[in-house]
Amino acid sequence: MGTLSVARTRWADRLGPPLMLVAGALVCLSRSPAAILHPELYAEDGHVWFSDAYNKGWFAPLSVPHTGYLQTFPRLTAGLGLLVPLTRLPELFVLVAVVAQLLPAAFLASRRLEGVVASRATRLVLAAIYLVAPNAREVNANLTNAQWHLALLAVLVVLARPGSGPWRAFDVVAVALSGLTGPFCIALLPVVAVAYLVRRERWTLVLLVETAVLSTLQLAELLSSARGHYGPLGITWRRLVEILGSQIVGGTFLGQTTQFNSLIGPDGTAVSVLLLVAGSALVGAAIAFGPLELRLFNLYAALVLAASLLSPVASVKHVQWQALAFDPQMRYWLFPTLALLADALWLATGARPRALALLGVGLLVVAATLAVREDWRYRPLPKVAWAAEVRAFDATRPGQKFIFQIAPANWKMTLVKR
């Protein structure tokens, strides 16, 4: 390779991550302009994270579990929110959430996964797939669900080949932030263990020890802390088929409108079965013949999904699995959706014989023309007159409680005026 080619390669490697951050920001703006241009506090953003930070101080809530586990990242952000004017709080929360959302794309665009996916073009396609993925409205641009993007970053760090210098610090921080923000580290632990047993890399052992410590901490919280009261699970084979076949496979490749219409039709269960069989064949091929890292990502997605189905927070009063079967684009579908799309990309770029590669291309084309197109624009949250709420709060006497209206509807944030 000539000197000019080497220089171009280096510049491409350096520019990849920042350009992906810019592209990702534009995608977020296109898919949800209201969330970016008119940010709102979303659910626990105000109801738990900021109200606890304001009423109890920024430090004390860090050790308080929510729904059974530690949620350090949003609590740290809420502490940071104490330093900005209250009128700017939604902007800060959405900015931090979007940065967390874009980090996995930037990581995929870096050279860290070069030892796993040699082609830079394929890595960029992977990053693009993540940014435009359908079936993922609930995890878009809100701090409460930033934990899902941190969990993705953590598993990518584990699957990547070890870096050097600053990358080591990045890896430790990424795994720690994810491990202290949700129970994902428990599902990550077997993935890191298998990666170490196969690779025998010293740095993977470091990440294994770190993940084991974090998993022990979160497991202790899950076993000792109350999660709250929710509706019964309502486990049935029909609901399982509808969730796996329609919500996940159908939502990934057909889009929510198409899959929902098929689910409520007279042949809804039969369509779900067909979708489940097709999706299972795709995943089975990736696990049987794909590279180690693709197999491990599928394992991670399956473990996270299994935990989500066994202990979901989908409805306070109604049957959980019934709510899941008819709740489109929710957070629980993110990892299986990404796994299915990654499996399809593997078929398109690395599978033999050629017929399988064409099948992979076909699946990606179907997903792009149906699911991505249908699910591109996210439904905006109900608007809250935040400036008016803040003015009313400012007029409240010290020591009095003030109840803010936040999104979605019927969610509130209570602050005791200082």
Image (cartoon, helix red, strand yellow):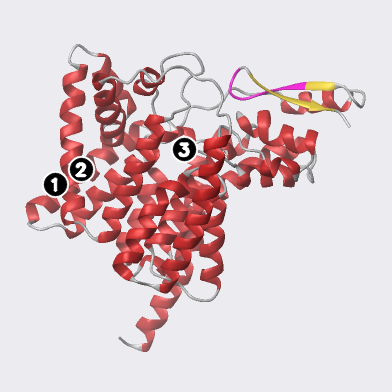
Mark 1 in CB contact with mark 2 (< 8 angstroms): yes
Mark 2 in CB contact with mark 3 (< 8 angstroms): no
**Residue 406, magenta (yes or no):** yes
Q: Which residue is mark 2?
A: 363
Q: Residue furthest top?
A: 266
Q: Quadrant of the C terminus?
A: top right
Mark 1 lies on a secondary structure that is helix
Closer to viewer: mark 2 or mark 3 = 2
Picture coordinates of residue 16, whole percent (x, y): 44, 65
Residue drawn at the location 39% of the way across and 39% of the way down: 334
Q: Which residue is mark 1?
A: 359
Residue density around tag 3, few if under 14, some if 14–19, many if 20 or more, within 10 Å = many
Q: Which residue is mark 3?
A: 31
Q: Which residues are magenta?
A: 403-409
Mark 3 in CB contact with mark 1 (< 8 angstroms): no
Answer yes or no: is residue 350 visible: yes
Q: Using the numbered discs, state the Cα–Cα distance from disc 3 to disc 1 in whole angstroms.
A: 28 Å
Q: Using the numbered discs, state the Cα–Cα distance from disc 1 to disc 2 in whole angstroms.
A: 6 Å
**Residue 395, magenta (yes or no):** no
Mark 2 lies on a secondary structure that is helix
Closer to viewer: mark 3 or mark 1 = 1
Picture coordinates of residue 110, whole percent (x, y): 43, 66
